[in-house]
Image (cartoon, rainbow, N blue to C red):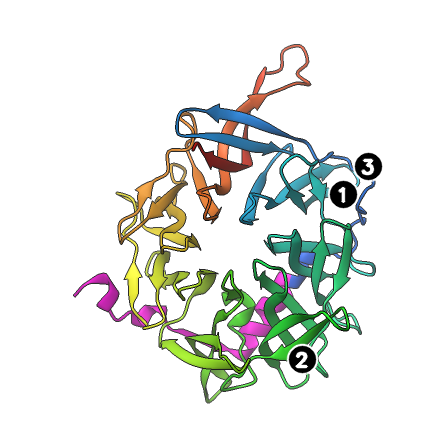
Amino acid sequence: MSNSQQKLPCFRSLWQLGGIKSLLATALAFSALAESPVISHGEETLNPPGQIRIVGDGANGKLEVFDNSASYSQVVAMNERGAVLGVRELLGPEVGMRTLAYFYSEGERLLDMPQLEGYTNVEGQAVSNDGKVVGYASRAMGHRDGSLAAVVWDTQTGKISELGTLPNDHVSHAQDISQDGKRIVGYSTAAEAFKVRPCLWSWNETTEHWDVSALPTIEDSNPFLITGGTVISPDGKRIAACITFKIHPGNRFDSSLYAWNLSEKGEWLRQEVSAESGVMRDLNNRGEMAVSMGSNHGLVPVRVNLEGEITIIDLLPGDESGEARAITATGAIFGLSNDPAGPEGGPQAFVAKGSQAEVLKLHPSSLYSAAYAVNDRGQIAGLLDVEVPNENAGEGEPAVLEKTLGFRWTPKN
């Protein structure tokens, strides 16, 4: 059978209620860093935003890295204009180690994502063409007003706002945004009845407010959304996520892959795509999805279309796991292919136009890399290891530092 015809029972998800609650608690506890100091937008930080370095400028394209951390940074999303959303580590005696989201648009300075008042941590996950960043703010578990809040940050004005929840819910998480910045998707949760529902925030031009609505589901409890994610197409007319189709005795939740398509009447029509499930990463206007599904050795990258055809991406030689992280308008998958576990292992960025992964040769000295975002201009972004000048080197210190940094590669015309 071809890759697209294989049945993949190991990709099915079966969650138990206790396990999901524990998972959510762990994720929140880690992300909130509840008592860590707040670093506000516009204030001087222990690690300033840094700079953009050109580390490769050849006949095929230009490679830039975001040298904005002493330890680690990456790019997690990019819009059609080439503006990037990333994450960088902060190090210092007062904050210890924590992460901070950053944004960069061509010709402007690097911006750190501001904190939402009343919360101790903020994470960005997606960015629109007009510079709106969506994600979540978090604080200590058990807070009476909820520990997680979906947020949108307007990078043009610097304002960060809470998106709210579905009626009677108290926790929400924004996971993706359309290119025009007018539709946001994620999930909303009510702990009392353990409701986890995919939802859509739509910008209301009349009220200048985000209206939230639930997407139609089979069950109200869809715990796989917490880790599996929700994605929206660039044109804002398709949404995809893995939701519960059956609840087994003992509060065990069986999930499958579904899509919602916007009808001419303005209704979101639910469509079952596949009995399999996985981590949703990207969705193009044709309805093709970049998904990471489970295997005996970890995740593997796959392409899924609306007919439910699954194409498993063949990994690079010798590799055992990988992830699909982005998809182009024509269906090319970008992501990472990973070596077996061990000290010599490490990911490499790949592109797969069909079913075979091909190495993305970004920089001759890089040992590992990952492609997390792509746009239709041909730009690619993610992370790689690279050597950069040690501008503060003292006597006896190395003149060059090896770092893992976020990158953006731009093709030459």
- Under circle 2, the secondary element is loop
Q: Nearer the viewer, residue 398 or 181?
A: 181
Q: What is the quadrant of the N terminus in the image? A: bottom left
From the viewer's side, name the closer residue of 247 and 304.
Answer: 304
Task: Name the residue tied to disc 3.
Answer: 44
Going from N to C along the chain, the mark reached first, 3 or 1, is 3
Q: Residues within 10 Å of mark 1 (few under 14, many from 20)?
A: some
- Dot 1 amino acid type: Val
Marks 3 and 1, how far apart at CA: 14 Å
Q: Is residue 366 left or right of residue 66?
A: left
Query: The residue under label 3 is which amino acid type?
Result: Glu
Does the stretch in magenta take in 16?
A: yes
Say which element carries label 3.
loop
Q: Which mark is residue 191?
A: 2
Q: Is residue 146 above or below residue 371?
A: below
Magenta span of residues: 1-27
Residue that appears at 35% across and 77% down: 275
Task: Report the quarter where the C terminus lies.
Answer: top left
The total number of labels drawn is 3
Is residue 115 visible in the rendered image? The answer is no
Instruction: Decide whether residue 155 is among the magenta residues.
Output: no
Mark closest to the chain's N terminus, 1 or 2: 1
Q: Residue 95 has which mark?
A: 1
| CB within 8 Å, label 1 to label 2 | no
Three-letter amino acid code at disc 2? Ala
**What percent of the width, then of the height, locates residue 82?**
55, 43
Discs 3, 1 touching: Cβ within 8 Å: no
In this rendering, the answer to whether 402 lies above or below 180 is above
**Which picture quadrant has residue 183?**
bottom right
Q: Return the x and y of residue 77 as percentages of the image width and height.
A: 55, 50
